[in-house]
Image (cartoon, helix red, strand yellow):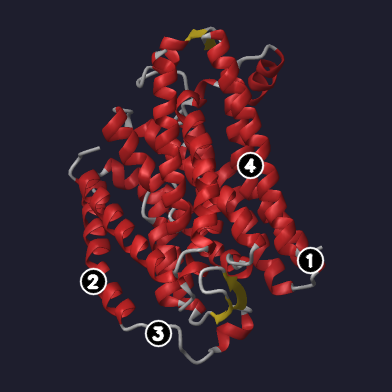
Amino acid sequence: MIAIIYFVELLLAGIIAGVVGSMSGLGGGVVIVPALTLLFGIPLEYAAGASLVSTIATSSGAASAYVKDKLANIRIGMSLEVATTLGAIVGSLLAAYIYANGISSYLFIVFGIVLIISIYPAIKEYKKGKMHRMNKDWSTKFFQLSGSYYDKAEKKVVRYSGYRWGLGEIVSLGGGLMSGLLGVGGGVLKVMGMNRGMRLPMKVTTSTSNFMIGVTAATSSAIYWSLGYIQPFIVAPVVIGILIGAYFGSKVLERTQSRKIRTLFLIMLGVVGLQMIFRGFGVA
Amino acid sequence: MDMDKLISNVLRTGVIISLILILIGTVLLFADNGSNGFTMAQIINVNSKINSSIFSIAGMVNGLFSLQGADFILLGIIVLILTPITRVITSVLSFLYERNWLYVIITVIVFIDIMVAIFIVPVILGH
């Protein structure tokens, strides 16, 4: 009986994580790690393992809808994955070094503060309204960064182009580095790089980020598996919940106005920032 | 075939197979009140030592025939991990079919990165 109640509680945490993760483009891990460690007292290693699998589940679950409805742009996603996977490899190689030298806590605090500070200029820029007007540059054409999708909230076809591919690539490299090094924060940089760097519409950004995060997470899977971070009883209910949540999240995102998705992203930016600062000070 | 549809189907198929395996595993776990010789109390303990490090692929496949819940769940997780990797392979083939050479190169690089991360990085780190 205790086992069933425990299972249902983990399932509910998974559903919430799936909805938030699929709509913000950050994956379910952002919600799952603090929920498992703070509410359930699960050790960080098992929470990290559940987070990795959650990220892949949110990504694959929601992206199947986003890709079919052409919200996620496969070319943009794949071209940025070159940087995120490379960053993740370098990050996981450096991780051992930063943990051995005890500088990981400083990195968590510094990155956490940077994320929280970055909320302010983002709000200012979003308030100005139209931010997607720019002249096409060489990369728009060369990397085929244009596309269109049908916006179910505004009931019209939205045509868009991405600019400054190089900037997107550099920010994504940083995102991959963070995923490999600290295990969190990668999705935030992907969204920033695509939305504010490459000037892609918010829905294209979060759904393409969603499409990408599964691949970045898969790069850490072999290490997590052999370290024994994956506990079947914790992961099973969380994954089932995440898949249910991601399914609904993807339906809701398509019908939500971009403005609201931006607000959700900014809130999550603050949540991730605070999480990193807490981790830096050794709280969960 | 439309590439977006193809990739969407690959992702959906992976998710469904994974979900079915995890659901069967969960039902078995509760029905047997344990798995792989461990009791339920041992498995649900937050500090339980029953985790991926003590499971091998060969052992899990054997576990399927003897209906061990944890083996089904972990195999479902492996299918889930393989899903985005399969979608990268599918993209390589789709871009080849479209003769979009720039993106054939890009997707091949991503695939190589993943293989390095899974097979070479753990060796360098000594896991």
| Residue at horizontal 45 percent and vertical 70 percent from the top | A202
The residue labelled by disc 4 is B15
Query: How far is disc 2 from disc 3 in space, using C-alphas?
Result: 17 Å
| Front label number (3 vs 4) | 3
Query: The residue tagged with tag 4: helix, strand or loop?
Result: helix
Q: Relative to residue A219, is residue B26 depicted above or below?
A: above
Residue position for label 2: A120
Q: Is the residue A163 above or below the residue A102 in the image?
A: below
As drawn, the label of residue A130 is: 3
For disc 2, the chain is A
Q: Earlier in the sequence, mark 4 or mark 1?
A: 4
Q: Residue furthest bottom?
A: A135
Q: Nearer the viewer, mark 3 or mark 1?
A: 3
Mark 3 and mark 4: span between their CA atoms? 37 Å
Q: Secondary structure at mark 1?
A: helix
Residues behind callouts 3 and 1 on a single chain: no
On whether disc 4 and disc 1 are found on a single subunit, the reply is: yes
Nearer mark to the viewer, of 1 and 2? 2
Q: Residue under circle 1?
A: B96
Q: Amino acid at mark 1?
A: Leu
Q: Secondary structure at mark 3?
A: loop
The answer as to whether the residues below labels 2 and 3 share one chain is yes
The reply to whether callout 1 and callout 2 are in contact (CB within 8 Å) is no
- Residue type for callout 4: Val
Residue at mark 3 shares a chain with residue at mark 4: no
Q: Are marks 1 and 2 on the same chain?
A: no
Q: Nearer the viewer, residue A209 or A221?
A: A209
Q: Position of residue A252 (x, y in %)?
A: 50, 57
